[in-house]
Amino acid sequence: ITVTRASGPGSVTLQNATALTNAQGVATFPTLSLSGTMGTHVLSAGSGVLTPATTPITLAAGEAVALDIATQPSAQTTVGIALGQQPTIRLVDAFGNPTPATTAYTINASVDPASVDSGFVTVFGETAFILPGQTSTTFDALTLNALLGNRPRLIFSNATLASRISEPITMLSGPAASLRIVTALPDTLRTVGPSTWGLITPAPVIQLADAGGNPSLQS
């Protein structure tokens, strides 16, 4: 006699699903196991031309083994400004089913070094928490500072779970946060006379800069 899945959501895997009948015509499946998409599945036990026997079984999510990105961070963001779309990170079992936490998890966001082309990328508001009974968490103030031209990806990680990497994020120039000297003053300036101002050449140039050191395009 062989047990198969007759209907149900997604896909499942049955193991040790075949057994022989004994002298009383009874087949026992001592190590039958089922894994896959959670939900209600109908199992069918059949043999040749005999009418099969069916029974429903509900498959619940397993233990959390990995993180999953339920909502990706914004595809583009302004330097120094919190992401308009904050990422949502959830716990999943070995088959990708969302599963509730049985303990508290700290979720950290960091920059994938392989996604940094030049300069630096700094992350702020990089920690979120999934508490017992919760399936997911949404960051509330995740912010990036970076040199323009970079399209960083974020790594979401926990010490005991498999991590996930986001889609790339395009960086846009942010509001002015500091001043940057483009053309510096000369080391020495000589006065022309006791009542004449010395003309500074070349003329000093000061640029508005955003939190990432990029030119801030505002007046």
Image (cartoon, rainbow, N blue to C red):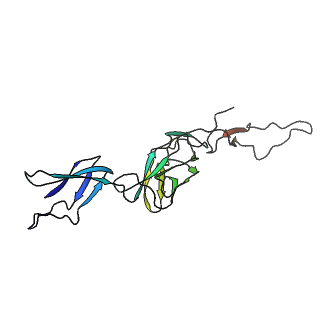
Q: Which residue is drawn at 36% across and 58% down?
A: 62
Quick check: 134 left or right of 40? Answer: right
Q: Which of 23 and 142 is in front in this view?
A: 23
Q: Which of 37 and 106 is in front in this view?
A: 37
The relative height of residue 81 versus residue 37 in the rendered view (above or below) is above
> Which residue occupies the extreme right position in the image?
194
Q: In which quarter of the image is the C terminus?
A: top right
Q: Residue at x 68, y 38 (%)?
A: 207
> Which residue occupies the extreme bottom position in the image?
23
Quick check: 208 left or right of 114? Answer: right
Q: Nearer the viewer, residue 76 or 158?
A: 158
Q: Dividing the picture into quarters, in which one does residue 160 lie? A: bottom left
Residue 116 percent coordinates (x, y) = 50, 49
Residue 151 percent coordinates (x, y) = 49, 43
The relative height of residue 199 versus residue 188 in the rendered view (above or below) is above
Quick check: 115 left or right of 174? Answer: left
The relative height of residue 22 versus residue 211 in the rendered view (above or below) is below
Q: Nearer the viewer, residue 134 or 211?
A: 134
Q: Quadrant of the N terminus?
A: bottom left
Marks counted in the figure total 0
Q: Which residue is drawn at 10% across and 55% down?
A: 47
> Which residue occupies the extreme top position in the image?
219
Residue 101 percent coordinates (x, y) = 46, 58
Residue 30 percent coordinates (x, y) = 21, 66
> Which residue occupies the extreme front position in the image?
24
